[in-house]
Image (cartoon, rainbow, N blue to C red):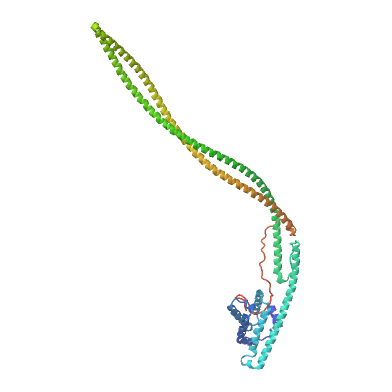
């Protein structure tokens, strides 16, 4: 930077300028530069194309103050390296924001015009015609000179840019043509310095594309193999799913039949339970009747005992009657003929008493036999009652068992209905799965075909020595996006900058 500044100072013959000249100019600047800058920035505020570089009026004021400070430092500190750094920084800001040279060269012309008038015809001298003319002449000379510089510089930059762009576009066109032909090993080299980033970005992009296609090539092989396995597995799965669907359909039919049988068993169990309930009621009623029969037999036994007692009394009476008749016969025999009639009566009485005794004995025997039969009947009826009681108990137990069987059968029937419904749902889902598996198999076949097509398309590209080997993922990152290039020019008109440089006029 030092050599560049000295070369410029020597060419401009500013290396021999004495300090007194700079002091006088600085003094004049102190008097006139504020008015010149004020007029210039009012004009800038009225031009939309230039006003757009400022966010608000405060940035305009900031730029004006920075411009004032820059000019005062030039003629206060001299044309030092610090000046050069500031001027280069301003030029870089202009290039970054895209401000064309015509605007800041024209800005210098307007500011210098005001400064020339202030320096040549200051104060009352502005009323002297010769001074005013001289100021106008010098201002016109400076403005025309700067306009000529603006046109020449703009033409130079456009011409140079066109030549450089032609070289760049030529190389880029050749490289893109080779890429279009499938050669991804192509590289760009030897571009001008200002296009070095373009060269680097292009080479990085082709490397990334080459690496991507290598990875795609490797992935296509894996996809082809995997899709083949998927297709085989899907076909096998489709076959087994169809078999499973058929088996499940048969299972569903068997479950429906089993459900109907269980429901029929449930209905039969309920009917048997109802019949057992009736049987239990009838057995209970029979037990009651047997109990009554046992009571009646007990009454008969008691009556037979009473009859036996009566027969015993009758037998005693017959015995006594027989004795009385015997005594009467003895007394009639003693009476002789007078007692013959009485003897006949006594004999008849004895015969009647004997028949009564015989009848009583027969009745007693019959009563005894009847009592024995009644005892046997009571015993049998008692055993019958006990047996009926046991039967009633057993019938009750059987009824309870059948009730539990009926309840269990109902529960099983409900469960079988649920199972049947679940099996039906499974059958539907299996049918759906079979359809989806068939679709998956078709998709797998399509994927295998697409992978083959992709492999053929990738195979048309030249990817270098790495074509035959798997590609590892690299850590390549695309180059950061850069703004569109604008002309790099020098100047010291204050524009957009941070607090450390100038970002606005």
Residue at x 28%, y 9% (from the top left corner): 344
Q: Quadrant of the C terminus?
A: bottom right
Horizontal side of residue 371 vs 35, given as left or right: left
Single out the residue that lies furthest toward the top.
336
Disc count in the image? Answer: 0
Horizontal side of residue 131 vs 361, given as left or right: right
Residue at x 56%, y 43% (from the top left corner): 420
Residue 345 appears in view: yes
- 147 vs 52, nearest the viewer: 52
Q: Quadrant of residue 453?
A: bottom right
Q: Quadrant of the N terminus?
A: bottom right
- 246 vs 313, nearest the viewer: 313
Find residue 142 and report its horizontal and vertical position in percent.
69, 85
Measured along the vertical axis of the image, is residue 376 above or below residue 450? above
Find residue 121 and report its horizontal and vertical position in percent.
64, 90
Find residue 363 and report its horizontal and vertical position in percent.
35, 18
Q: Quadrant of residue 324?
A: top left
Horizontal side of residue 210 vs 498, given as left or right: right
Measured along the vertical axis of the image, is residue 126 above or below residue 210? below
Find residue 45 and report its horizontal and vertical position in percent.
61, 80
Residue 73 appears in view: no
- 249 vs 310, nearest the viewer: 310
């Amino acid at each position: 930077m030092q050599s560049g500044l000295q070369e410029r100072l020597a060419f401009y013959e500013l290396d021999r300028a004495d300090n007194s000249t700079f002091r006088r100019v600085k003094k004049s600047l102190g008097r006139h530069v504020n008015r010149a800058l004020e007029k210039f920035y009012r004009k800038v505020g009225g031009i939309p194309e230039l006003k757009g570089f400022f966010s608000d009026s405060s940035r305009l004021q900031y730029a004006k103050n920075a411009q004032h400070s820059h000019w005062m430092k030039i003629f206060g500190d001299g044309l030092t390296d610090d000046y050069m750094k500031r001027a280069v920084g301003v030029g870089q800001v202009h290039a970054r924001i895209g401000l064309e040279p015509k605007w800041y060269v024209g800005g210098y012309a307007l500011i210098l015009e005001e400064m020339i008038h202030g320096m040549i015809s200051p104060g009352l001298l502005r009323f002297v015609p010769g001074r005013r003319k001289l100021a106008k002449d010098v201002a016109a000379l400076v403005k025309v000179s700067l306009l000529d510089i603006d046109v020449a510089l703009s033409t130079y930059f456009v011409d140079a840019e066109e030549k450089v762009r032609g070289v760049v576009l030529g190389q880029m066109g050749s490289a893109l043509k080779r890429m279009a032909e499938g050669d991804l090993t192509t590289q760009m080299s030897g571009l001008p310095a200002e296009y070095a980033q373009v060269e680097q970005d292009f080479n990085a992009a082709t490397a990334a594309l080459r690496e991507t296609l290598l990875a795609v090539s490797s992935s296509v092989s894996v996809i082809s193999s995997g899709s083949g396995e998927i297709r085989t597995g899907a076909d096998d799965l489709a076959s087994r799913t169809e078999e499973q669907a058929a088996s499940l359909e048969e299972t569903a039919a068997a479950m429906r039949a089993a459900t109907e049988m269980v429901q029929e068993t449930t209905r039969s169990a309920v009917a048997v339970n109802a019949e057992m309930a009736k049987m239990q009621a009838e057995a209970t009623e029979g037990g009651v009747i047997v109990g009554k029969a046992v009571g009646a037999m007990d009454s008969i036994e008691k009556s037979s005992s009473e009859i036996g007692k009566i027969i015993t009394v009758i037998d005693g009476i017959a015995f006594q009657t027989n004795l009385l008749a015997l005594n009467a016969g003895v007394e009639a025999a003693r009476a002789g003929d007078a007692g013959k009639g009485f003897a006949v009566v006594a004999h008849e009485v004895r015969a009647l008493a004997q028949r009564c005794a015989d009848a009583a004995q027969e009745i007693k025997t019959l009563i005894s036999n009847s009592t024995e039969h009644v005892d046997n009947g009571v015993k049998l009826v008692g055993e019958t009652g006990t047996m009926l009681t046991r039967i009633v108990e057993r019938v009750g137990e059987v009824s309870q068992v059948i009730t539990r069987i009926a309840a269990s059968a109902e529960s099983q029937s409900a469960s079988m209905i649920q199972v049947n419904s679940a099996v039906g749902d499974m059958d539907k889902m299996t049918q759906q799965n079979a359809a989806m598996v068939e679709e998956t198999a078709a998709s797998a076949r399509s994927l295998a075909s697409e992978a083959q097509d992709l492999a053929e398309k990738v195979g048309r590209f030249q990817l270098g020595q790495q074509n035959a080997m798997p590609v590892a993922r690299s850590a390549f990152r695309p180059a950061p996006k850069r703004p569109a290039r604008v002309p790099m020019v020098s100047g010291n008109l204050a524009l957009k900058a941070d607090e450390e440089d100038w970002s606005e006029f």
